Amino acid sequence: MPVASQRKAFSRAASGVPTAEEDSLEISPAWEPGGEAVEGLHRWRASLREDMSRTLDDPRWPRALAGVGVVHLLAFLVCQALAEPVSRRDLRYLAIWFVELVCVFGVMRALAGRHWIRRSAAVNLAAKLWTTFLILSFNVVSLNSLVGIENPWFKAVWGTLSTFLFASLAWLFTPLFFIPAVQMWATGMLMAQFDPYAYLIYGVSWSLALFGIAGWIRRAH
């Protein structure tokens, strides 16, 4: 009997007819978020936005963002002054960007408060996105240097990364951040078109974006 049953199973497998065990198997459907998960996500976003709104009620924030805009503009004016017709590796740019980063943290600490980055969950999340943006910005410079800095395509990519940063803030907090996101898209296009003035374009655009955000916070809060 066992031999006969094995022969039947073998014949069914050879003929392509599914066995009873195979008939009982069901393919599990793809996972889809349930109502509770979606509702929880909406509550998290609403809580995050409320937290950011409460934090921005502090009148120090517009001054801090405007101060960062000034630091950024000055740093990239220096970069523009050092720009040459043919790009080459120049450690002075790294020094300028490092000094700018230190000055940004100094301005934020002086104008926004000592523990500004840990004051709220919303600000902490925005700071983490900004840190990721800085890492990626430095990464594209490193990649461009490895493949040949003579064609400095990293400058236009900075515009794309800036667009991604502001678009992420728009999805998390307010659609108004799509305004600087579109601005940074146009900035990248201008940097690609007018490469000799890319540092100037980038510095002015970011400064205008920060000044605009500071002005909006002042009016709204």
Image: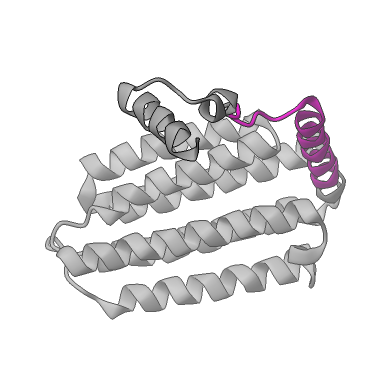
Whether residue 16 is visible? yes
Instruction: State the predominant SS element of the stretch in magenta.
Output: helix
Residue 37: x and y in percent read: 77, 34
Asked if residue 109 lies left or right of residue 202, the reply is right
**Total label count?**
0
Q: Quadrant of residue 150?
A: bottom left
Q: Residue at x 33, y 60 (%)?
A: 140
Where is 82 relative to 185, above or below?
below
Image quadrant assignment for residue 213: top right
Q: Nearer the viewer, residue 216 or 21?
A: 21
Locate residue 136, reporting x and y percent.
43, 59
Please, which residue is most extreme toward the front here?
A: 1
Quadrant (top left, top right, bottom left, bottom right) of the C terminus: top right
The answer, for residue 149, to whether it is visible in the render is no
Look at 59% across and 68% down and name the residue there.
104
Part of the protein shown in magenta: 28-53
